Image: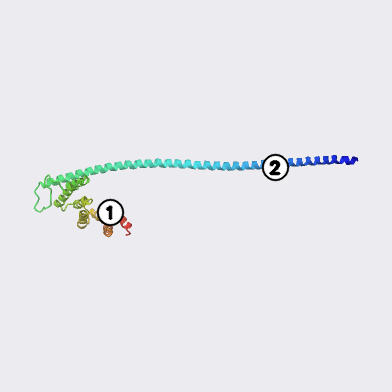
Amino acid sequence: MSSVRLAPALAVALGACALKGDVRRVETQVAQLRQETARADSARAVSLGRRLDEVLALQRAVLDSLSAQQRRLTLVQGELRSDLTDVQRQLVQIQELMGQSQQRLSELRGQFEQRRQQLAAQPPSGGDSARVPALGEPGPEQLYDLAVRQLRGGSPQTARQALQKLLADYPQHDRVPDALFQLAESWASTNADSAAQGYERIAQQHPNSSRAPQALYKLGLLAEQRGDSRAARVYYQRVVAGYPRSEEAALARTKLSGRGG
């Protein structure tokens, strides 16, 4: 009878012991899990710290490189400004020299014309048939300068009168090719046929003058304007073949290359 009463109490005691053991195991596992979690967090923190250091180091390197490039750019800009200032100063000096040279040339031309007029007052020798301007009459250089000024001033008719007088009175003068060219230029914007005749006259009568390649190139441009591409090509080829070192030859080559030869 007594053994029957003790059985329930024994079962309760044994159950309590088992429950306490489970609790201790759970606590142990929880403690281990916490330790593992702490170690993992620590390792993750270390890894993140390393990555952050790497990113910061890369950022510093980029900033240093940008600073160095900015310094170089500032230096280059300063050098360019200095070079530009030097070039501008040299251009001013060149312009001053050109102005002085032009003034001197005008003075020499004036002296030359004055001398020619003085010679005109003297009786010519028996075999001298050269045309010399009479006293007070403008010479070829003065006529040419007058014509150029009138053209630039928008008075082509007055310019033509001076040029035609030069051609009539001084047909052997060195200014004749220039006068013919300016005469053709005076018609270029209003009468293409008259301009073309003037350019052709230069090419035929004065092929050795510096105006010849200019005249041929102008004829090519006029041919282009009237839609005659074949004639334009012929004129450009004449410039290249006859005057290969002239400025117009370079322009003509560009025209020919654009037209396929």
Label 2 belongs to which residue? 33
Q: Where is residue 219, by image quadrant?
A: bottom left
Pointer 1 local density, CA inside 10 Å: few below 14, some 14–19, many at least 20: many
Q: Is residue 52 above or below residue 166?
A: above
Quadrant containing the N terminus is top right
- At horizontal 47% and vertical 41% (from top left) the residue drawn is 68
Horizontal and vertical percent for residue 116? Answer: 14, 47
The kind of residue tagged 2 is Leu
Badge 2 vs badge 1, beta-carbon distance below 8 Å: no
Q: Please tell me which of labels 2 and 1 falls first in the chain.
A: 2
Q: Tell me where residue 6 appears, x and y as whole percent.
A: 87, 40
Question: Alpha-carbon distance for marks 2 and 1?
Answer: 94 Å
Residue type (three-letter) at the residue carrying disc 1: Glu
Q: Look at 16% across and 46% down and name the residue there.
A: 113
Inspect this view and state whether residue 15 appears: yes
In the rendered image, residue 223, in percent from the top left (x then y), is placed at 26, 56
Residue identified by numbered label 1: 248
Q: Residue at x 28, y 42 (%)?
A: 95
Residue count near mark 2 (Cα–Cα under 10 Å), binned few <14, some 14–19, many ≥20: few
Viewer-side residue, 125 vs 243? 243
In the rendered image of this protein, does residue 261 appear above or below residue 3? below
Single out the mark in the foreground, 2 or 1.
2
Can the viewer see residue 246?
no
Q: Which numbered circle lies on residue 153?
A: none
Q: Secondary structure at mark 2?
A: helix
Judge by depth and name the residue closer to the eye, 101 or 7.
7
Q: Quadrant of the C terminus?
A: bottom left
Residue 149 coordinates in the image, percent (x, y): 20, 45
Looking at the image, residue 64 lies above or below residue 250: above
Q: Going 67% across and 42% down the picture, which residue do you hit?
A: 37
Q: Which colouring convention does the figure follow? A: rainbow
